């Protein structure tokens, strides 16, 4: 059961330069792991004008105070009037990465009488921002974690990710070295045309984040819970696609309900409803359940 980032594989195994773990109880207040977010907002009510912000949160802090305004790291403000397109985000990222590199080596903070080291271990954004930050092609073309690509939109249909019969062929984690190699090759492209061809064949653009020697744009880019859970994408997939589409039957729901009773939930996560098989399925389930 994963209750917080500390239960995850990255936190437990993130290596220091000498291959010993970077996050340990002894280094809890000197080796910081940060998660960054990029998003746009409208500062004015009566005109369309998008500003962007890149900010970080310190994962070492307990969840109750991690996201408080006073504990956020404001890393960059992106002026309007419109969202910065694709790889042009790199102009803003470059300055942030320069500082992250210094912090990876360690910076003496006199007030704390400590040498603080910091690693960027997680990017959490909506899908367009996520792709931009980490240099992946649009989510309507392919997955950034595995080799699944969308079916092309012939016959006027929208492109989609249907078709799981050939799963063994694509359900494989993307290769980090291959990603880094293709990103480097992107930098050698000499024209817009060449860039377009490179991105459609490799699905990769250069991102300044790749200058961080430890950064993995495939694993550290996560699916964000806000859009997936709180805005109802997961619920929509289960209800509309699986239940209404008869992929999950009443018997399956009953089996799931039986099994759910045996799940041990950490004390601070509340309780999970046990009415999976009632009504239309997942009766009155809240998004995060
Ligand atoms: Zn995938």
Image: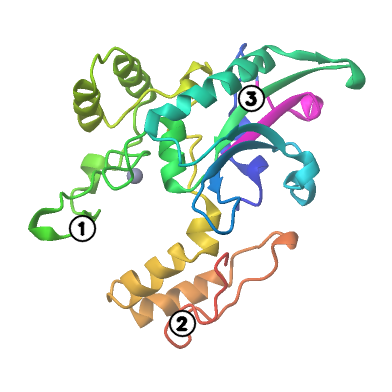
Magenta-span inclusion, residue 104: no
What residue is shown with label 1?
158
Q: How is the image coloured?
A: rainbow
Q: Residue at x 42, y 77 (%)?
A: 253
Magenta-span inclusion, residue 30: yes
Q: Is residue 130 above or below residue 120?
A: below
Q: Which residues are magenta?
A: 21-37
**Residue 106 in view here:** yes
Q: Is residue 80 above or below residue 21?
A: below
Give the alpha-carbon distance from disc 2 to disc 3, as whole Å: 44 Å
Give the alpha-carbon distance from disc 3 to disc 1, as whole Å: 39 Å
What residue is shown with label 3?
119
> As drawn, is 154 to the left or to the right of 134?
left
Q: Is residue 249 above or below residue 3?
A: below
Mark in front: 2 vs 1: 1
Nearer to me, 155 or 46: 46
Q: Residue furthest bottom?
A: 279
Classify mark 2: residues with Cα within 10 Å, few (<14), some (14-19) or many (20+).
some
Classify mark 1: residues with Cα within 10 Å, few (<14), some (14-19) or many (20+).
few
Q: Label 2 CB, ligand 1: below 8 Å?
A: no
Say what secondary structure mark 2 lies in: loop
Mark in front: 3 vs 1: 1
Say what secondary structure mark 1 lies in: loop
> Residue 178 location, x and y as percent?
32, 21
Going from N to C along the chain, the mark reached first, 2 or 3, is 3
**Residue 62 in view here:** no
Q: Residue at x 63, y 20 (%)?
A: 100
In the picture, residue 264 is in which quadrant?
A: bottom right
Q: Is residue 177 above or below residue 163?
A: above
Going from N to C along the chain, the mark reached first, 3 or 1, is 3
């Amino acid at each position: 059961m994963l209750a917080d980032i500390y239960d995850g594989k990255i936190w437990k195994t993130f290596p220091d330069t000498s291959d010993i773990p970077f996050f340990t109880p002894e280094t809890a207040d000197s080796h910081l792991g940060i998660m960054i977010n990029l998003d746009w907002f409208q500062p004015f009510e009566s005109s369309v004008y998008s500003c962007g912000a890149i900010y970080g949160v310190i994962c070492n802090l307990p969840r109750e105070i991690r996201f408080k305004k006073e504990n956020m790291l404001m890393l960059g403000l992106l002026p309007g009037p419109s969202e910065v397109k694709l790889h042009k985000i790199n102009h803003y990222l470059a300055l942030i990465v320069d500082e992250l590199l210094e912090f990876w080596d360690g910076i003496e903070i006199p007030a704390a009488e400590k040498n603080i080291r910091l690693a960027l271990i997680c990017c959490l954004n909506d899908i367009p921002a996520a792709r931009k930050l980490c240099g992946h092609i649009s989510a309507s073309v392919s997955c950034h974690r595995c080799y699944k690509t969308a079916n092309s939109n012939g016959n006027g249909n929208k492109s989609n990710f249907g078709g799981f019969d050939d799963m063994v062929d694509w359900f494989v984690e993307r290769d980090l070295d291959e990603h880094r190699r293709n990103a480097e090759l992107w930098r050698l492209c000499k024209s817009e045309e060449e860039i377009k061809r490179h991105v459609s064949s490799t699905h990769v653009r250069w991102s300044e984040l790749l200058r961080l020697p430890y950064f993995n744009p495939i694993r550290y880019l996560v699916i964000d819970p806000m859009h997936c859970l709180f805005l109802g994408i997961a619920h929509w997939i289960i209800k509309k696609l699986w239940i209404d589409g008869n992929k999950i039957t009443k018997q399956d729901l009953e089996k799931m309900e039986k099994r759910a009773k045996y799940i041990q939930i950490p004390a601070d996560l509340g309780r999970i409803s046990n009415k999976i098989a009632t009504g239309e399925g997942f009766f009155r389930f809240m998004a995060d359940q």
